[in-house]
Image (cartoon, rainbow, N blue to C red):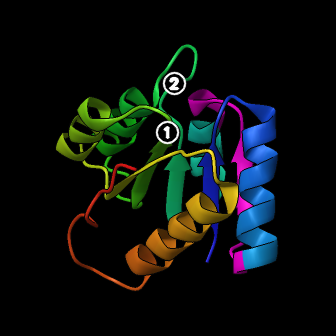
Amino acid sequence: MKVLIVDDNPSCLELSKTFLEVFHDIPSDTVDSAKEALKMLEKDSYDVIVSDYDMPFMNGITFLRTIRDKRINIPFILFTGFGEEIMYRAIENGANSFLQKTGDSKTQYSELSKRIWQIVNSSTGPIRAEIK
């Protein structure tokens, strides 16, 4: 399994990669923009995309719509500090799951890894979104 993490915040990228790889045995690549993510998707394959929402030039939902328009059907988790309105927009646009960032890194990355494993091991529709 391999995950692509997209976030414009370098510390979030590093923290995400560390938590997923070291504590949850989930290999990942990181990029700091949706534009870079699109380039990565052209040359590598991924089992899940985890993307922030609030990024310059192309937000997470625009990125999601772009990959869906290109018929890229890789499962997509929107992982953001924004709440309910963004969650609904993400699910409407084809996200498989939504997870709101919280202050507790251990809890949020445990939940993120759980969602990743659920999506990879399931061929069903969207995983129930939770707002904390």
Q: Residue placed farthest to the top in the image?
A: 57
Identify which amino acid the numbered label 1 is placed on. Thr
Q: In x, y percent, where is residue 126? A: 24, 63
- Name the disc covering residue 15, or none: none
Give the residues drawn in magenta, as a range.
24-36
Identify which amino acid the numbered label 2 is placed on. Asp
Residue 100 magenta:
no
Does the rendering let one see residue 130?
Answer: yes
**Mark 2 = which residue?**
54
Residue 25 magenta:
yes
**Mark 1 = which residue?**
80
Q: In x, y percent, where is residue 43? A: 65, 52
Residue that appears at 68% across and 28% down: 8
Mark 1 closeness class: few <14, some 14–19, many ≥20 residues within 10 Å: many
Residue that appears at 77% across and 71% down: 21
Q: In x, y percent, where is residue 72? A: 38, 52
Q: Of 40 and 123, which appears nearest the observer?
A: 123
Mark 2 closeness class: few <14, some 14–19, many ≥20 residues within 10 Å: some
